[in-house]
Image (spheres, rainbow, N blue to C red):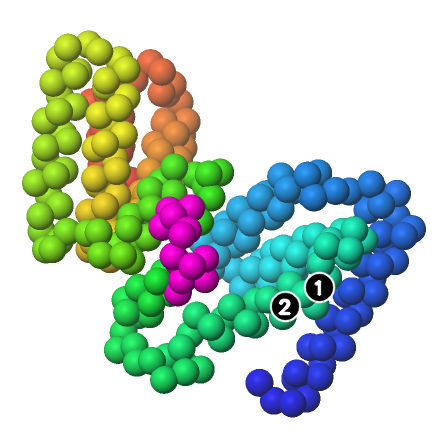
Amino acid sequence: MSQDRHESTIKVFNELLNIMDELRMKCPWDKKQTNESLRTLTIEETYELADAIIKQDATLIKKELGDLLLHIVFYAKIGSETDEFTMEDVIRSLNEKLIYRHPHIFGDVEAKDAKTVEENWEKLKLKEKGGNKSVLEGVPLSLPAMVKANRIQDKARGVGFDWEHKEQVWDKVQEELDELKVEIEAHDEDRMEAEFGDLLFSVINAARLYGVNPENALERTNRKFIKRFNYLEEKTLKVGRDLKKMSLAEMDEIWEEAKNL
C-alpha cells in the first residue's frame, strides 16, 4: 500500500472514531449499549458477512465488513470509557501478536508451507502462556458444532495428535457407523445420539485430512438441495399439482430433471 493510501486510510479511520465519540455522547440508542447488548448483534453481523462471502458479492462484503468494523470500534469505545483498553491498545496488541506469531517473516525461522506456519502458530500460542494453557482452551464454546469440531481437530493436529496416514480415517468412519447401527437396532435413543455425534466427528475429521472444509462442503450441498427442491415446487405448481398429494416416484422424476439443470 502506498504512503498516500496509508494516510487516506488513517484519515477515514480517525473520522470513524470521531463519529463513534459523537454517537456515544448524543444518540440515545448508542449511549445505552453495553458489551452484553452488542454481543448477539455482532454474531448476526458476522453471519451476514459470511453470507456475503458465500455469494461472492464484493459490494456486499464491503458493506458487511464496515458493519463489523463498527462493532469493533464500539467495543473499544466502551473499553476506553471504563479505562480498561482503547482502540490503540487493541491495534497495538494485534500488531505485536502478528509479529510474534510470524517469526518466518519477522524473524529467522523457516516455514516451507502453510501447514508448518499453522503448527508454529499453535506452538507459539501455548508458549505465550508459559506452556500451561490447554491446547483446546482457545476454541470458543459458542461456535457452531461443526465449526467447533473442525477447529478442535486442527488444534490437536497442531501438536502432533493426528493420523499417521490420512487413509486410516476411513476405518474409524466405518467403525463409528457400525457402532451407530448397533444402537439403532437396540432402540437406545441416548446412545444413538452419542454414536451419531461420533460418526459426524469422524466424517469431519476425514474432510479435514483431505483438505475439504466441512462447513463449506455441507453449505454447498444445502444450496444444491434448495435449488433442486425449488425447481420441484415450481414445476409442480406449473402443472397444477400438490406436492403433498404426489407419490415419491412422481417427485423423483422431477428431481432427476432438476439434477440436470
Residue that protrudes farthest toward the right in the picture: 26
Q: Residue at x 24, y 27 (%)?
A: 196
| Left/right of residue 69 with respect to residue 211 in the rendered view | right
Q: Residue furthest top?
A: 187
Q: Which mark is residue 87?
A: 1
SS label for mark 1 = helix
Q: Amino acid at mark 1?
A: Met
Q: Residues within 10 Å of mark 2 (few under 14, many from 20)?
A: few
Along the viewing direction, whichever of 117 and 61 lies nearer the viewer: 117
Residue 91 badge: 2
Residue 241: percent from left, percent from top = 37, 20
Tell me, yes or no, if residue 217 can be seen here: no
Where is the N terminus found, in terms of image quarters?
bottom right
**Residue at x 16% of width, y 23% of height:** 180
**Residue type at mark 2?**
Ile
Q: Name the dominant secondary structure of the magenta segment.
A: loop
Q: Is residue 74 above or below residue 186?
A: below
Marks 2 and 1 close (CB-CB < 8 Å): yes
- The span shown in magenta is 124-137
Q: Residue 225, image x and y in percent?
A: 33, 38
Q: Residue at x 64, y 42 (%)?
A: 39
Q: Is residue 129 magenta?
A: yes
Q: Is residue 1 magenta?
A: no
Q: Nearer the viewer, residue 56 or 106?
A: 106
Disc 2 element: helix
Residue at horizontal 11%, vertical 18%?
182
In this rendering, does residue 132 appear at all? yes
**In this picture, residue 55 sits left or right of residue 261:** right
Q: Position of 83 compared to 240: left or right?
A: right
Percent from the top left, x then y, of residue 31? Answer: 85, 45
